[in-house]
Image: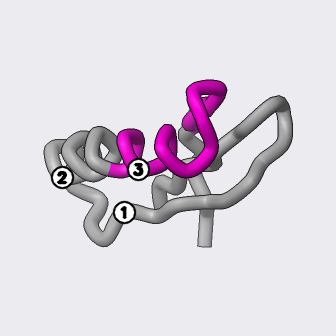
Amino acid sequence: MKIVFDVTVDGKVKETIQPQTQRLKEIHSFIKAESNGLIKKYGSNVYINRRVVYN
């Protein structure tokens, strides 16, 4: 089981990002850091949705 995040811009999934580790504190800091870069890349209409992938 892995947690991944879909980056949605204007209702379309543009990319999927995966944190290196699955520790909750590290995932939180990873998403905070990535969100700033994604806003610069795609503009202000960016949504990050969490999803679980089962292997």
In the picture of the structure, the residue carrying the numbered disc 3 is: 37
Q: Earlier in the sequence, mark 2 or mark 1?
A: 1
Q: Amino acid at mark 2?
A: Glu
Q: Are marks 2 and 3 in contact (CB under 8 Å)?
A: no
Q: CA distance from mark 2 to mark 1?
A: 8 Å
Q: Is residue 23 magenta?
A: no
Q: Which residue is mark 2?
A: 26
Residue type at mark 3 is Gly
Residue 14 position within the rendered picture, expressed as x and y whole percent measured from the top left: 74, 54
Disc 1 to disc 3, how far (Cα)? 15 Å
Q: Is residue 11 left or right of residue 35?
A: right
Residue positioned 41% across, 50% down in the render: 37
> Which residue is at the front of the view, 47 or 18?
47
Identify the residue at horizontal 15%, vertical 44% (top origin). 25
Q: CA distance from mark 2 to mark 3?
A: 17 Å
Q: Residue placed farthest to the top in the image? A: 45
1 or 3: mark nearer the eye:
3
Residues drawn in magenta: 34-49
Residue 5 placement, left or right of 21: right
Can residue 1 be spotted in the picture? Answer: no
Q: Amino acid at mark 1?
A: Pro
The count of marks equals 3
Asked if the residues shown at circle 2 and circle 1 are in contact, with their CB atoms under 8 angstroms apart, the answer is yes
Residue behind mark 1: 19
